[in-house]
Amino acid sequence: MRITPQVLALRGLVRPEVRPHPFQPPDRMVPKLTPLQRLLHALAAGATATRTWRVLLLLLIVVVSLLALTPRPPAHVDFGWDKANHMLAFAALAFAARLGYPAPRAARLLWPMALLAFGGLIELLQLLVPERSGEWLDLLADGAGIVCGAIIATAVLRAASALSRRGS
């Protein structure tokens, strides 16, 4: 039996070559995507890049730790309300953790609980930093951010899954 590209494609070893119909105008060969579809495609591709999200999570942990444990954090990273700072920081951490460590349903609470413990540790350590104080409301804002980030990441993963099933 002669091995041709068609035989390899039938066996699933290579992707078949897609050739446009010879009478089809060039602008119809590639479907036009709306900006929302392009964004969803980018998120779908990014949602599967777990190593990238893990590196981003590590960098975010370092940045959040430095910002939380310095006596006077830079003013240009302040959103004007301390609780908003906590919520946004922990939403970003939860988003990166959920995409970096897509776990089975039984283990999905591991990262949110670890991030909440990290928030508690920061609040305890802030008691030792001059001009800083630990507050229960900050920990509550951390928890709200974790919930928001996890919900958004789960929505992105579902959209990416739906796109991959649809074959777009």
Image: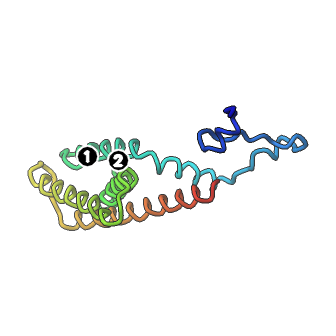
**Res 77 label:** 2
Asked which colour scheme the image uses, the reply is: rainbow
**Res 129 label:** none
User: Whole-Å distance between the Cαs marked 1 and 2?
Assistant: 9 Å
Is 13 on the left-hand or right-hand side of 99? right
Q: Could you tell me residue 37's position as x and y percent?
A: 63, 55
Task: Look at the picture and state if 68 lies above or below 13.
Answer: below
Crowdedness of circle 2 by 10 Å Cα count: few (<14), some, many (20+)? few
Is 139 on the left-hand or right-hand side of 53? left
Q: Nearer the viewer, residue 139 or 152?
A: 152
Amino acid, disc 1: Leu
Mark 1 or mark 2: whose residue is earlier in sequence: 1
Dot in front, 1 or 2: 1
Please tell me which residue is depicted at 25% across the width and 46% down the height of the picture: 67
Amino acid, disc 2: Val
**Res 67 label:** 1
Q: Residue furthest right?
A: 23
Task: Look at the picture and state if 60 lies above or below 165.
Answer: above
Q: Are marks 1 and 2 in contact (CB under 8 Å)?
A: yes
Q: Could you tell me residue 90's position as x and y percent?
A: 31, 57
Is 73 on the left-hand or right-hand side of 163? left
Q: Could you tell me residue 139's position as x and y percent?
A: 22, 64
Q: Nearer the viewer, residue 9 or 102?
A: 9
Give the SS element for disc 2: helix
Task: Look at the picture and state if 11 lies above or below 98.
Answer: above
Please tell me which residue is depicted at 60% across the width and 44% down the height of the picture: 12
Q: Is residue 80 visible?
A: no
Q: Report the label total.
A: 2
Q: Is residue 32 visible?
A: yes
Please tell me which residue is depicted at 38% across the width and 60% down the height of the picture: 149
Crowdedness of circle 1 by 10 Å Cα count: few (<14), some, many (20+)? some
